[in-house]
Amino acid sequence: DLATKGLEVIEALARHGYDVIFMDVQMPELDGLEASRRIRAGREAIRPWIVALTANAMQQDRHEAMLAGMNDFISKPFEAGAIEKRLRLAYRNLYPAGMEALEAEAERVACGRDAAAAVPPLAHCAGSRLG
């Protein structure tokens, strides 16, 4: 899913359970920092891994993101590999027991050992995304 405003993130999270949210820090109506604070102040059953996306790369910006309840931080512009790295970190923390099996399956598919599989398993996991 894609949300372009902080309030849309809050609303989408209320409708669906997301494992990972890529949250732009600067969004209209409600910025990503405040949206993260509200998510963390909400129901404890919903604990998504929140990755800050921002053009600001200063240590103070990272610190503010962590204080707002974000778990990780990516400075823009970023390479596609940064997203995969953050997803792996998120799933290692969210599902420590299952990550090893997920990585083994992704490697098996990526190495062409399963021609019937069109998309590696991690790509299915990556679908849990908001702006």
Image (cartoon, grey):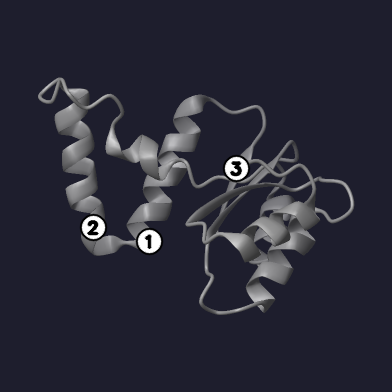
Q: Position of residue 128 (x, y in %)?
A: 50, 47
Q: Nearer the viewer, residue 129 or 94?
A: 129
Amino acid at the residue labelled 2: Gly
Residue found at x 39% / y 45%: 125
Disc assigned to residue 80: none
Residue found at x 54% / y 71%: 46
Q: Secondary structure at mark 3?
A: loop
In the image, 16: left or right of 77? left
Q: Position of residue 7 (x, y in %)?
A: 79, 57
Amino acid at the residue labelled 3: Asp
Q: What is the C-alpha distance between the residues marked 2 and 3?
A: 24 Å
Q: Which residue is mark 3?
A: 1
Q: Which image quadrant: the N terminus? A: top right
Q: Quadrant of residue 84?
A: top left
Q: Earlier in the sequence, mark 2 or mark 1?
A: 1
Amino acid at the residue labelled 1: Asn
Q: Which image quadrant: the C terminus? A: top right
Q: Residue furthest right?
A: 29
Q: Is disc 2 in contact with disc 1, using a CB cutoff of under 8 Å?
A: no
Residue found at x 53% / y 25%: 79
Q: Nearer the viewer, residue 102 or 53?
A: 102
Residue found at x 44% / y 41%: 126
Q: Earlier in the sequence, mark 2 or mark 3?
A: 3
Q: Earlier in the sequence, mark 3 or mark 1?
A: 3
Q: Secondary structure at mark 2?
A: helix
- Residue 9 can be seen in this image: yes
Q: Is disc 3 in contact with disc 1, using a CB cutoff of under 8 Å?
A: no
Disc assigned to residue 98: 2
Q: Residue furthest left?
A: 113
Q: Nearer the viewer, residue 126 or 14?
A: 14
Q: Which residue is mark 1?
A: 93
